Image (spheres, grey):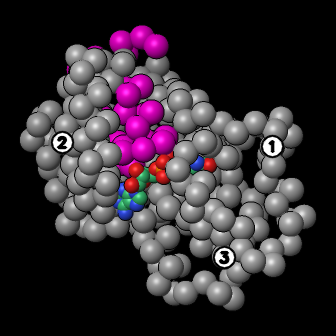
């Protein structure tokens, strides 16, 4: 890791835990100033405090990515503090396995609201500032957004949406210097896995589709590394890229 982000300002959603926390720490190690945004106030502050303890510049912001009030306020807070925004990492997410006939409209809307609308709102509100810096958006999608996962209609639809949101924004803003990329991980060892308990009477054989041939679970730091690569100023022509980190699940 170099100091390629010295002077940059980075906003990470989902920064209280897992991939978001590892991402915030990775950018901070590269010299970036961090806005750590999460619905989990204490967790986001723990991440920001850990960065400050290492000599970095970070603050936490509490809010819900599916709320326009919160996304606007967070972007404003980052701009007020840093005067610029160079990278938006949309990492916040939720999900679960459900038999589709048992999925409530409320649960469906919540998953779509956080994973897809949340990524859209953050992008929409950050784009004016990112255009000023010829910045980058990196979205965290999932292999569930590329091929079917069992009992994951809402999660898969939301992540498939994130993949196409990424490509669409990449096309729309390419000529104005804003890049938009996404990473699609398979299973990463983070607390979100606890949300994915197998439903009763699930067809076990369907889960074989999502087991990596190398049988590894991924560490969140590896996904943070991919996010940092996709944001890197050394990759000015990388936009619209959907990078799969999955131990071979989708080959
Ligand atoms: N862990 C995996 O196996 C895996 C695989 C593929 C993709 N992903 C994606 O990676 C991203 C990060 O997940 P993770 O694995 O680090 O899980 P995690 O549960 O450790 O972190 C998710 C974070 O998002 C925050 N969050 C949830 N709802 C929010 C909201 N409405 N507003 C703001 N913050 C909110 C949570 O508080 C938490 O800090 C998610 O988008 C997830 O879908 C994870």
Q: Secondary structure at mark 2?
A: helix
**Left or right: residue 76 compared with residue 159:** left
Q: CA distance from mark 1 to mark 3?
A: 21 Å
| Labelled disc at residue 212 | 1
| Residue 78 disc label | 2
Mark 3 or mark 2, whichever is nearer to me: 3
Taking the magenta stretch, the answer to whether it contains residue 152 is no
Counting from the top left corner in percent of width and height, residue 118 is at 39, 62
* Residue at x 84% of width, y 56% of height: 209
**Residue 182 rendering spot, x and y as whole percentages:** 54, 44
Q: Which residues are magenta?
A: 1-27
SS class of the residue under badge 3?
loop
Disc 3 within 8 angstroms of ligand 1 (CB): no
Q: Is residue 123 left or right of residue 112?
A: left
* Pointers 3 and 2 in contact (C-beta within 8 Å): no
Task: Using a 10 Å C-alpha cutoff, classify the residue at mark 1 as few (fewer than 14 neighbours), some (14 to 19) or many (20 or more).
Answer: some
Whether the residue under disc 1 has CB within 8 Å of ligand 1: no
Which label lies toward us, 1 or 2? 1
Q: Nearer the viewer, residue 16 or 179?
A: 16
Query: Is residue 72 visible from the viewing direction of this image?
Result: yes
**Residue sitting at x 31%, y 57%:** 39
Q: Which residue is mark 3?
A: 98
Q: Residue furthest right?
A: 205
Q: Earlier in the sequence, mark 3 or mark 2?
A: 2
Dot placed on the residue nearer the N-terminal end, 1 or 2: 2
Q: Are marks 1 and 2 in contact (CB under 8 Å)?
A: no
Q: Which of the 4 quarters of the picture holds residue 33? A: top left
């Amino acid at each position: 890791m170099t100091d390629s982000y010295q002077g940059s300002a980075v906003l990470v959603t989902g920064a209280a835990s897992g991939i978001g926390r590892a991402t915030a720490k990775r950018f901070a190690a590269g010299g970036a100033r961090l806005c750590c945004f999460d619905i989990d106030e204490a967790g986001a502050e723990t991440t920001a405090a850990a960065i400050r303890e290492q000599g970095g510049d970070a603050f936490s912001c509490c809010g819900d990515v599916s709320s326009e009030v919160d996304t606007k306020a967070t972007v404003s807070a980052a701009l007020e503090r840093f005067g610029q925004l160079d990278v938006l990492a949309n990492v916040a997410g939720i999900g679960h396995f459900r038999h589709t006939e048992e999925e409530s409209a409320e649960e469906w809307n919540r998953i779509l609201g956080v994973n897809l609308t949340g990524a859209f709102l953050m992008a929409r509100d950050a784009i004016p500032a990112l255009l000023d810096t010829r910045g980058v958006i990196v979205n965290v999608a999932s292999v569930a957004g590329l091929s079917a996962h069992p009992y994951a209609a809402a999660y898969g639809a939301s992540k498939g949406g994130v993949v196409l949101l990424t490509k669409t924004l990449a096309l729309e803003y390419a000529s104005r210097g804003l890049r938009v990329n996404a990473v699609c991980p398979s299973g990463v060892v983070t607390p979100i896995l606890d949300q994915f308990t197998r439903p009763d009477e699930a067809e076990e054989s369907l889960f074989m589709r999502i087991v990596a041939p190398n049988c590894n679970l991924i560490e969140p730091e590896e996904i943070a590394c991919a996010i940092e690569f996709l944001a890197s100023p050394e990759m000015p022509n990388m936009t619209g890229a959907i990078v799969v980190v999955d131990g071979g699940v989708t080959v």
